[in-house]
């Protein structure tokens, strides 16, 4: 499983651990991913996604998965979510 958010495209970043003596060693900053089940009112089914915590808060703020996907840009979405967005758009 890739460590990438399916809604926002957030992926791991690179950086350094810096000691008190200013020694630098490489490290990765991983996104805070959660496996979440969303309910689509338009499709009337549950959808399981691997989502960052920040994206989960954004979906709640927008008013649900259906409303979030209407305004989301396709270049950040995963293939699975692009298909879901197309099927939601077809139903509306």
Image (cartoon, helix red, strand yellow):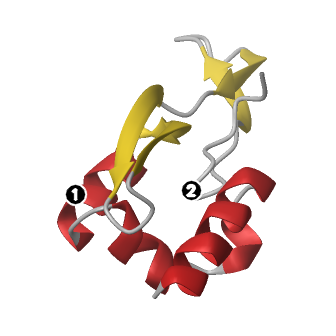
Give the residue drawn at x 69%, y 39%.
4
The C terminus - image quarter = bottom left
Is the residue under label 2 in contact with that under label 1 (CB below 8 Å)? no
- Res. 27 image quadrant: top right
Side of 27 where 34 appears, left or right: left
Instruction: Point out residue 25 in the picture as x, y percentages from the top left corner.
Output: 77, 15
Q: Which one is in front, 22 or 32?
A: 32
Other residues around mark 1 within 10 Å, as few (<14) / some (14–19) / many (≥20): few
What numbered label is drawn on residue 42?
Answer: none
Side of 11 where 45 appears, left or right: left
The N terminus - image quarter = top right
Alpha carbon distance from label 1 to label 2: 13 Å
Q: In this rendering, is residue 35 above or below 59?
A: above
Residue position for label 2: 7
Sequence-first tag of 1 and 2 = 2
Q: In this rendering, is residue 80 above or below 88?
A: above
Give the residue drawn at x 71%, y 33%.
15
Instruction: Point out residue 72 in the picture as x, y percentages from the top left corner.
Output: 53, 78
User: Please, what secondary structure does the residue beneath circle 1 have?
Assistant: helix
User: Please, what secondary structure does the residue beneath circle 2 have?
Assistant: loop
Q: Which one is in front, 50 or 52?
A: 50
Q: Which one is in front, 72 or 11?
A: 72
Residue position for label 1: 60
Instruction: Point out residue 14 in the picture as x, y percentages from the top left corner.
Output: 75, 36
- Res. 84 image quadrant: bottom right
């Amino acid at each position: 499983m890739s460590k990438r958010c399916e809604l926002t495209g957030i992926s791991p970043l690179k950086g350094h651990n810096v000691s008190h003596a200013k020694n630098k060693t490489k490290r990765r900053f991983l996104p805070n991913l959660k496996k979440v089940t969303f309910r689509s009112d338009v499709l009337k089914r549950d959808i399981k996604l691997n989502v960052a915590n920040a994206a989960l808060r954004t979906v709640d703020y927008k008013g649900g998965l259906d409303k979030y996907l209407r305004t989301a840009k396709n270049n950040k979405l995963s293939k699975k979510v692009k298909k879901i967005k197309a099927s939601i758009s077809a139903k509306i």
